[in-house]
Amino acid sequence: MKCGKPSTNVQNVPPPVTIGSSLSCSKNSTITRLSTSQPFTIAFTSAYLPSSWKLSVIIPLLKPQKDPFLSLSYRLISLLSSLRKILEKFINKRLSWFLELNNFINQSQYGCRKDRSVTMALAELDALIQNANNGFST
């Protein structure tokens, strides 16, 4: 089948698969609807990651004013599966929530935490310094 021309033989064309609205045909011709969260649920419960989610496309980009014949002149960009990136965000949110809920993270940790920032750390440090200068201890 050439690009741009519709297929005349419909039997050989596989149905398009789109997460959330996809249809799956079984051997007995029954059609079942797949849930949007099904791939993620399978990944969580079975610790199985589809092999297509493990692949990435690496694109070398030439750095400005660099020799194109040197390998160090290129910046590598890795294109990952969108579903894998979504799964990683879900895992990160669940793990962060669990660690915060059970107080596994030190209260002095400000980086990479929700509702914490460098500004808050600097404000706490400033308050400690001012208290020390005023003769108070905390």
Image: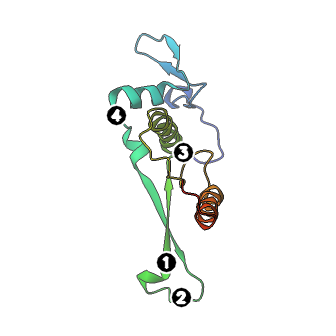
Q: Earlier in the sequence, mark 1 or mark 3?
A: 1
**Closer to us: 23 or 126:** 126
Mark 2 falls on what kind of element? loop
**Closer to us: 30 or 115:** 115
Q: CA distance from mark 3 to mark 4?
A: 17 Å
Q: CA distance from mark 1 to mark 3?
A: 24 Å
Tell me which residue sits at (59%, 26%) in the image. 20
Tell me which residue sits at (38%, 38%) in the image. 50
Amino acid at dot 3: Ser
Residue 78 drawn at (x, y percent) = 48, 60
Q: Are marks 3 and 4 in contact (CB under 8 Å)?
A: no
User: In the image, which disc is placed on residue 48?
Assistant: 4
User: In the image, which disc is placed on residue 66?
Assistant: 2
Q: Are marks 1 and 3 in contact (CB under 8 Å)?
A: no
Residue 113 drawn at (x, y percent) = 55, 48
Q: Earlier in the sequence, mark 2 or mark 1?
A: 2
Residue 95 drawn at (x, y percent) = 45, 38
The residue sitting at the front extreme is 135
Q: Are marks 2 and 1 in contact (CB under 8 Å)?
A: yes
Answer few, some or many: residues within 10 Å of disc 1's Cα (few below 14, many 20 plus, some between 14 and 19).
Answer: some
Image quadrant for the N terminus? top right
**Closer to us: 79 or 87:** 87
Q: Is residue 109 above or below residue 101?
A: below
Mark 1 falls on what kind of element? strand
Amino acid at dot 1: Tyr
Q: Earlier in the sequence, mark 4 or mark 1?
A: 4
Q: Name the residue beneath numbered marker 1.
A: 74
Q: Name the residue beneath numbered marker 3.
A: 82
